[in-house]
Image (cartoon, grey):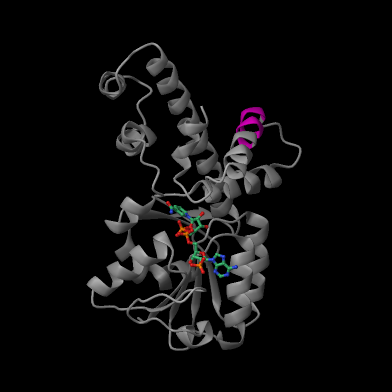
């Protein structure tokens, strides 16, 4: 199976490297040219020989731009796997654009940031056509520890946004708790040792402990993308009351204004 990966950001690069290690080198494209084996300067050429096309770019406008570039080259028999985190409404819109070309569309947001992608611990949330999922399985299973079919088209994107809302709020709770402990003179090592055996220990605290202790905000998952995910969640929620999420989004707005967008989303701890 021939694969093309469109988007060589943090995640696309990790996936492309893993497929190369498996002897399945993908054709790759990125808006800003990259020195990477298999790089094609033209997105349409990158997808022309591919059975499976993975799109993993920033946000809905980025997905739209990629689809505009490749739509004339898409054809029946290909599967487009849309992995970027977007909303259900955008997913349905892009699916209809792709399906008009005869290609299949698979909704495939995922969880697991840079370290997980590097060691194939990504988990894909899949929505829509089961047939498209089965066609994509040989490649997605190499890149991930699990593939979960969530439901009809749009459901996987909604679940992904719900999960990120939870992660963002857990991260904020951890940051404020640590801030208080530090102010009370508790050393970070003691705080995290106690957390290991406390009911509030979380995947987020395990993942971010070293970064918070070191004040290292190099991105595993950037603030600007979490900001985008909270915006998409609140847009999708409409009039639904999500009071803490709305308040937290204001802190993300502040982080963006302060120029922290390209840093890890744990950088909000600095605003405290
Ligand atoms: P990233 O490192 O910031 O890379 C973003 C990619 O999008 C780059 O390839 C960038 O190209 C491209 N892009 C941005 N605007 C574009 C446009 N208008 N047209 C074409 N390409 C455009 O992002 P990432 O961390 O890999 O994340 C990619 C997606 O996965 C996002 O939707 C994110 O929310 C989601 N995600 C990420 C993680 C994570 O932990 N990193 C986890 C789960 C989900 P340039 O190089 O030209 O800017």
Residue drawn at the location 43% of the way across and 82% of the way down: 51
Q: Residue reaching furthest front?
A: 258
Q: How many numbered marks are there?
A: 0
Q: Can I make out residue 259 in this image?
A: yes
For the N terminus, which image quadrant? bottom left
Q: Position of residue 48 (x, y in %)?
A: 48, 88
Q: Position of residue 269 (x, y in %)?
A: 47, 32
Q: Seen in the image, is 181 located left or right of residue 80?
A: left
Q: Is residue 95 above or below residue 86?
A: below
Residue drawn at the location 46% of the way across and 47% of the way down: 263
Q: Nearer the viewer, residue 130 or 229?
A: 229
Q: Is residue 263 above or below residue 212?
A: below
Judge whether residue 245 is colored magenta: yes
Q: Seen in the image, is 260 located left or right of residue 182?
A: right
Q: Name the dominant secondary structure of the magenta segment.
A: helix
Q: Can I make out residue 159 in this image?
A: no
Q: Nearer the viewer, residue 171 or 84?
A: 171
Q: Residue reaching furthest right?
A: 239
Residue 23 in which image quadrant: bottom left
Residue drawn at the location 36% of the way across and 53% of the way down: 114
Q: Is residue 69 above or below residue 11?
A: below
Q: Nearer the viewer, residue 107 or 209?
A: 209
Judge whether residue 169 is colored magenta: no
Residue drawn at the location 67% of the way across and 28% of the way down: 243
Q: Position of residue 216 (x, y in %)?
A: 36, 41
Which segment is the magenta one?
A: 243-249
Q: Seen in the image, is 210 located left or right of residue 159?
A: left
Q: Position of residue 215 (x, y in %)?
A: 36, 36
């Amino acid at each position: 199976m021939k694969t093309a990966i469109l988007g060589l950001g943090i995640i696309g690069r990790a996936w492309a490297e893993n497929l190369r290690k498996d002897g399945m080198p993908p054709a790759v494209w990125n808006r800003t040219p990259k020195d990477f084996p298999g790089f094609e300067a033209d997105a349409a050429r990158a997808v022309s020989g591919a059975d499976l096309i993975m799109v993993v770019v920033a946000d809905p406008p980025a997905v739209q731009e990629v689809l505009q570039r490749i739509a004339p080259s898409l054809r029946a028999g290909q599967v487009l796997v849309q992995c970027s985190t977007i909303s259900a409404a955008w997913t349905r819109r892009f699916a209809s654009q792709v399906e008009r070309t005869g290609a299949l569309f698979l909704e495939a947001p995922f969880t697991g940031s840079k370290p997980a992608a590097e060691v194939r611990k990504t988990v894909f949330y899949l929505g829509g056509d089961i047939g498209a999922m089965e066609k994509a399985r040989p490649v997605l299973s190499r890149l991930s520890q699990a593939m979960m079919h969530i439901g009809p088209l749009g459901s996987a994107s909604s679940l992904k946004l719900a999960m990120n809302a939870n992660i963002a709020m857990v991260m904020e709770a951890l940051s404020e708790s640590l801030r208080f402990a530090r102010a009370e003179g508790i050393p970070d090592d003691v705080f995290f040792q106690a957390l290991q055996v406390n009911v509030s220990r979380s995947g987020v605290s395990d993942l971010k402990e070293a970064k918070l202790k070191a004040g290292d905000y190099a991105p595993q998952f950037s603030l600007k993308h979490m900001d985008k995910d909270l915006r998409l969640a609140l847009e999708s929620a409409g009039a639904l009351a999500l009071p803490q999420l709305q308040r937290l989004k204001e802190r993300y707005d502040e982080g963006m204004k302060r120029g922290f967008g390209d840093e890890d989303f744990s950088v909000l701890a600095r605003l405290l």
